Structures are given as structure tokens and as C-alpha cells.
Image (tube, rainbow, N blue to C red):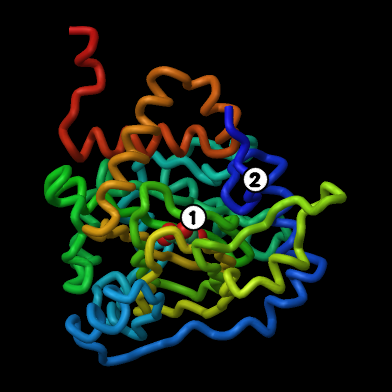
Amino acid sequence: MQTEQNLLKRRDVGALRTVEAAFRSGPFAELLDSAPELERRSGMTREEFEQEYRFKRRPVVLEGYAADWPSVRGWSFRYLAGRCADVPVVVDSYSSRAARKTTFGEFVTRLEESAGSGAAPLYLQEWYYQINAPEIAEDMPELDIAQYDFRRNLYGEAASTNHQLWIGQQGGITRLHQDAYSVDVMHAQILGEKLWFIMGPEAELVPGPDGEAGLDALCASPDTRLMRFVLRPGDVLYLPALWFHRIELLSDSIGLGRKCLDEVNVRAHVRQRIGELLALALNPDELRVTHSELFEVVIARARALADRMDIDLSRLRQ
Ligand SMILES: O=C(O)CCC(=O)C(=O)O
């Protein structure tokens, strides 16, 4: 097996810990406060967005672009619990040791009970709500700027609206990662505030001659392109494919993770999708090692896609 040298791209526990530690202390952590702010634009038209950002692969925050969504105007944890009380969810799914199954109603009760207790913040990450709670989608209307999503052509309409909700407590963290399958991130903030750090696709953290992660080189390289910003209710982030991102919840928060496949990335997307499916089918043990923290997330993603494409996962047995 080839070993990925860039620690930012690896998904094994050792690499995840090293990268997360770099955000907490040392030369890279010191840089975070002075990182430049990502550009924010308000009142932008779809045409301006396409010409000035999407075609140039430039990230941007579209301030207040989703401000009139019913979810932005009306949602709270309690309100959602009223609508989705018995819906099954997996909380803290990004850590194989912390992940556990519960219902959405119980998750919200635990959020309320543990608020301010000093316990580790709870985070419901990458919740494919369309599977068990499709009715809440009406509160998050489709974005006109997201209509370029080529997955509609590849997989059909339902799969292209296979979005995820991210619901968690102040202090929750999503570790640095690149989104799989070369999709653009279009993240809409619904409730609360999140601090994002992003880095360009060429950012690299490799071990130096002493074997330690080369943090000074990461800080110094023009490829790193570190930026920061806070996403507030109604804001929509456009982050082109393969940009790294790490998120910290500044308050209790709900965000909608919406992905878009740009036509220019179709080949890379198909290659990654097929590669992952082949690995799952032919070499799941290896995938368990390389994605030890995220193996169940990979399975959940594949199940969600099959569901949205109306694929019967038992059909090989027929
Ligand atoms: O909000 C988060 O914690 C993570 C969101 C994310 O990674 C995404 O939308 O791609």
C-alpha cells in the first residue's frame, strides 16, 4: 500500500491527532489569530457568483444569502425535536470511540441537560436527514447558486439533494479535512455561529528530516493559503473542491452541508467514488485501517446514496 506523505490528507488516528494538535499549540496555532479573513459579499447575483468565484475557484462567504429560509427564521433545537423526536441518529459519528446511536429527541434532551456542565460537547455530524425526516427539507429551499451540481446528471435529482445537517453544542469541533469525491462545499448556517479555518488544496504537512511534522514549513509556504471567518445565520459559504477546512462551534449551532459537483471535477469524482466502492467491496479490512475513525461514516454515506438512488442493497442475494 502507498503511504500518503501529506498528514493533512491522511485519515488514520495518528495523523488526525498530529494535525489537531497543530491547531491547539505550536507555531501553526500561533498563526491562526492573524490569518486573513475570507472575503464576504452581500447582495451578489448568481451571475456575479459564477463569474467572480465559481469559474475562478475562489472561496467566498455570501452574507445573508439564505437569510429568508424558514429554518433560519424559525428553528431551535427544541422545535426540531418536536418534529423529529423518534428519528434515529448517530451522534459524534466522526470518532469511532465516541459514536453512539440514539433518537433525535433524546439527543436534544441530552444537549439541554449537559449544557454548561463541562462535559465534552455533543455533535451530530453529517446527518442525512432526507432518509428519515424528509419533511424538514421544505425549510431549507434549494439555492439558485447551487444548481450547477452535476450529480443530478450522474445520479438523479434525489441523490443531488442528499444534504447533511450538522447540529451541535458550543465547543464542538470538526477536524481538518478535505471533502471526499471532489465536490464543492456550499454550507448554509442556520443557527448560531461557527469559526472556520480553511487552507488551499496544495497545503502540505510532511515530516521533516527529524521525523516530526514540518509545521514551520506549513506556516511559511505560500501554498498553505490559511484563512479564517465566522459563519453566521443566513450566511452561505462557497468552498471549491479539495480546500481543507476545520470548524469550531462558537455557540450551539445548526448548519446545512450542501455539496455541488462542478462539471470540471466529474472525472476525479467518478474515480474516487468507484475507488471507494471497490475498496469497500474488495478490501474493507484495509479501509478500516486507513479510515479507522471514519469507517462507519463511509458506510453511512454509501447507504444514504443507495437510498436516494433507490438501490436495493440486498439485490446481490436475489
Ligand atoms: O460544520 C461542520 O462542523 C463541518 C461542515 C463540513 O465539513 C462541510 O459542510 O463540508
Quarter occupied by residue 81:
bottom left
The three-letter amino acid code for the residue at tag 2 is: Gln
**Does residue 160 appear left or right of residue 67 in this picture?**
left
Residue most toward the bottom? 43
Residue in the picture at 41% in, 87% down: 40
Residue at 24%, 73% in the rendered image: 70
Above/below status of 63 relative to 161: below
Q: Residue at x 59, y 42 (%)?
A: 11
Please tell me the numbered disc located at residue 95: none
Q: Which residue is at the front of the view, 315 or 260?
A: 260
Whether the residues at callouts 2 and 1 have beta carbons within 8 Å, the answer is no
Q: State how far apart marks 2 and 1 are (Cα).
A: 15 Å
Q: Nearer the viewer, residue 318 or 254?
A: 318
Q: Determine whether, in the image, residue 210 is placed left or right of residue 247.
A: right
Counting residues from the start of the chain, the first of labels 2 and 1 encountered is 2
Q: Secondary structure at mark 1?
A: loop
Residue that carries the numbered disc 2 in the rendered image: 5
State the quadrant of the N terminus. top right
Q: Mark 1 packing: few (<14 Cα in 10 Å), some, or many (20+)?
A: many
* Viewer-side residue, 191 vs 87: 191
Disc 1 residue type (three-letter)? Gln
Q: Residue 71 location in percent, x, y?
A: 29, 70
**SS category of the residue bearing label 2:** loop
Q: Is residue 184 above or below residue 110?
A: below
